[in-house]
Image (cartoon, helix red, strand yellow):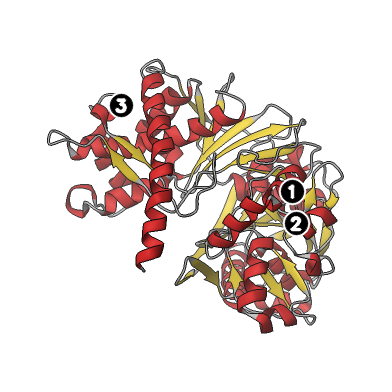
Amino acid sequence: MTKLWLGLDVGTTAVKAAAYTPDGRQVALSEAPSKVTQVPGGGNEQDMAQVWQTVTGVLSDLVAQCDGAVFQSLGIAAQGDGLWCVTADGAPAGPAMLWNDTRTADDLDTLDASGAAAVIGRGCNTSLWSGTSGMLWRWVRANRPEMAASTAHVMTCVDWIGLNLTGALATDFSDATIPFLDIASRSYARAQLDALDCADLADKLIEPRSADSVLGQVTEAAAQATGLPAGLMVSVGTLDLSAMLVGMGLHRAGETMMIMGTTAVVNILTDRIEPANAPVGASCLHPTAPVTIRVLAPTTGAAAFDWFAALHPQSLGGASAGEVAARMNALVRDVPPGANGVTFLPYLNGERAPFVAPNLRGAFHGLSSASTTGDMGRAVMEGAALSLRHCFEEETGLPTTPVQLTGGGSKNPVWCQIIADVVGQPVLVSAASDHGLWGAAALGASASGLGEAVALASRDEDLQSYTPQNHAAYGPVYARYAMISRSHRALQAELNTLRETTT
């Protein structure tokens, strides 16, 4: 009888679950969209009960696809940060506020000016941003006092799902890091709580654990809702990014990978953290290994591509993402590096790495009467790639070894070549696109006593390598991008002041 490992990934816009054989072969997949509610003022929220309902539907479908199989374990991962509040009896205290919520932008400015954000920087090596739990708790306390009063525990999305599956409360080191964990001691720091005036959260935080440890077993109620067998072992949930790293076999200092998804991410594993008042990007502890993940995550990645294509539905529209990409590629393929002088700043939803500027907005620069749609399309693809290079340049300098790339953008060969040219190292792309799900499944299997998670995640994968062909050409292009970015930030600050006095 077939024995399967299950993985669950609860993303911001979609929930996915998959079943695997122990050698990493995916035998079943289920997914469904997850609704995000946009609230005036920059809010992004989800109904916690609705998220759980979506999860139960996806798991039920997956179980039905695997009729007759024996499930050995379940590992879970999800979107990170944000604020998910529950009452003493485990019910939602209010809607979940997400990682990309910017309602606290003005409050963040005051904390930056007072030096409070620097305390966070020194403790968890993270440049504080609006969608972190401490910032959002300050907003809830001031604007939804009844919700704050009824909150017994604060958690992340995956902790909420784990609670519903097993009835147990737990969080892993990856999700617990930002903003209150001190990386050096791997425990919550009173100085960081006090810096954000969040001492009242001290008894609401959940003590972190390793993601390869046992959270609990599927309860009878969860079994009825999902079709999973009661008693199935579930691992402590982790950050989706952390699960992806496990699924890619990354756990040693010096290893690097990039994501070109809706958002873009540069991930650098390190065993050396130098405390800084204003670190570049964010940091979180690896879910199983004694290293820190430096997370430099520009807010806009492939979302810029989708936005630009949607502006031209007749010429760039298509019935599938692949068709849209093919049309865009045909448009930009013959445009030279540098897009004939056109630069795109991909700050459509603000920016969080390599600098934090939630009110910043995107822009084209260098347009002339001779500029074409192809120039602009190429500039959009280059802009997202240049933002990745910007992160490397501000952190450790350009990579010196090949870099793995995943996410939707990694399926676009033209874009992969641009990224390789921009960063100056071969870009390695796996034919597999399920590393987060597979990593979660491997963590679940590890928690069930089947071995170390990274070793269990090892599987045969076909890798496509994109070798740099025009790296030298992108030296001045990057210099131009960085210069315009600096000037644009100063201009945006003035524009924000003007906007505030006229609204």
Q: Residue furthest front?
A: 501
Instruction: Judge whether 164 appears above or below 127 on screen.
Output: below
**Residue 92 locus on image (x, y percent):** 67, 78
Q: Quick one: 108 or 470, which is closer to the camera?
A: 108
Q: Which residue is mark 3?
A: 338
Q: Which mark is residue 227?
A: none
| Residue 301 left/right relative to 27 | left
First-in-chain label (2 vs 3): 2
* Residue 485 x %, y %: 41, 37
Mark 2 = which residue?
A: 195
Tag in front: 3 or 1: 1
Is 19 in front, or is 275? 275
Q: Position of residue 50 (x, y in %)?
A: 57, 76
Task: Identify the mark nearer the N-term, 3 or 1.
Answer: 1
The residue drawn where x is 28% and y is 49% is: 309
- CA separation, marks 2 and 3? 44 Å
Residue 63 in which image quadrant: bottom right
Residue 131 left/right relative to 374: right
- Residue drawn at (73%, 35%) of the image: 251
Label 1 – label 2 distance at C-alpha: 7 Å
Pair 2/3: label in front: 2
Labels 1 & 2 near each other (Cβ < 8 A): yes
| Circle 3 SS class | loop
Image quadrant containing the N terminus: bottom right
